[in-house]
Every structure is written in C-alpha cells, then in structure tokens.
Amino acid sequence: MALSEHQFQDDLHPIDIVENIASHHDWDFDRIADDQIAMAVEGQWRTYSLTLAWSDYDECLRMVCSFEMEPPKDKEAALYELVNKMNDQCWTGAFTYWAEQKLMLFRYGLVLAGGQMASPQQVDAMVQTAVANCERYYPAIQLTTWGDRPADEAMNVAIAEAYGRA
C-alpha cells in the first residue's frame, strides 16, 4: 500500500506520523519520548541512525541522520573542506561532522509555524532525502578520509545521483 493511501488523522502529532511511516517501511524504531523517535534505516553503504524530535517552542520537527566515522586526525581538515562542498550541493539540510562523538550528521528542520501540520509525504520525503544524501556522499567521504583524494576529486563520484546497483 502506498504511503498516500494510509489514513492519517488531521491532528496527529508529528512524531506519530514518523512512527506510522517507520512501521510502513518496516524500519526498526524506538519511541524515546512523546516528542522523539529513533530509527535505523538500511542503506546501500551502511545503516543510518535517524532521530526525529518535535519542539513545541520552535514549532519544528528536527531530524538528525548520522553514521559513525573516525577519520585519521591528519584528514580532518580535508574532511571539513569536503563537508563544505557537499553542503554547497544540498538544497535541503546540511552535513556536519562531530569530531568528539565521531559522527557524520545530516540535519534538517521542518518548520511548522502557526499550527501547521506535517503531511506524511513531507515527513517521508524528509527521511528519504537524508538517507539519499548520506548514500550519495558516502563514497566521497571515504575517498577523502581513507583514499587520500582531494575534496574536488572525491566530489566527482557524488555529482550525479546513482540509479540502481552495480
């Protein structure tokens, strides 16, 4: 059944919508609190950890999609240069590297000011976009941090979106 065929109540909490989407896709998830959910989404390169949280104060559904990575210390400057280039290509969301936690993150916030409601399609697109961006740039990250390739050269593998599998 398509996501658009699911019946959603108009007054569902945004995290309830995320939980329904996670169930629809058979993703592992854990409802951490009324306003927060964590889930794992399997990609081609790795499994990504996603956390979505609702902030009443900001009227924002925040998402963080992360994966562990521990680049050699001498490659961190090149990694930050690559992250800047990746963010230049992203229209929604942004990457950041948390060195202390050894995590690469893709972050996005869906602002729903004025009592607006998130649609299931919006939330699903938000999650799918995060995973797609992580998948798209993961090879470039590996080339820069472990393959001794400069950021410009590594970005060449991420310029075009891949379709299918080799």
Image (tube, grey):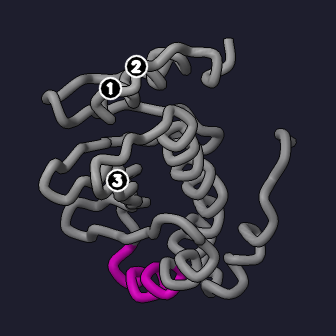
Tag 2 or tag 3, which sits nearer the N-term?
2
Query: Cα distance, mark 3 to mark 2?
Result: 17 Å
- Residue beneath the point at 19% across and 67% down: 100
Q: Which residue is mark 3?
A: 112
Query: Cα distance, mark 3 to mark 1?
Result: 13 Å
Q: Is residue 117 above or below residue 90?
A: above
The kind of residue tagged 1 is Leu
- Residue beneath the point at 40% across and 50% down: 65
**Side (left or right) of 102 relative to 77:** left
Q: Which residues are magenta?
A: 72-82
Q: Which residue is mark 1?
A: 12
Residue 155 lies within the magenta run: no
| Mark 3 nearby-residue class (10 Å; few <14, some 14–19, many ≥20) | some
Residue 158: x and y in percent read: 72, 67
Residue 98: x and y in percent read: 28, 68
Quadrant of the image containing the C terminus: top right
SS type, badge 2: loop
Q: Which residue is mark 2?
A: 9
- Residue beneath the point at 46% across and 19% down: 8
Tag 1 or tag 3, which sits nearer the N-term?
1
Tell whether label 2 touches label 1 (CB within 8 Å): yes
**Residue 89 image-quadrant placement:** bottom right
Pick the front one: 62 or 73: 62
Circle number at residue 66: none
Residue 21: x and y in percent read: 48, 24
The kind of residue tagged 2 is Gln
- Residue beneath the point at 63% across and 87% down: 150
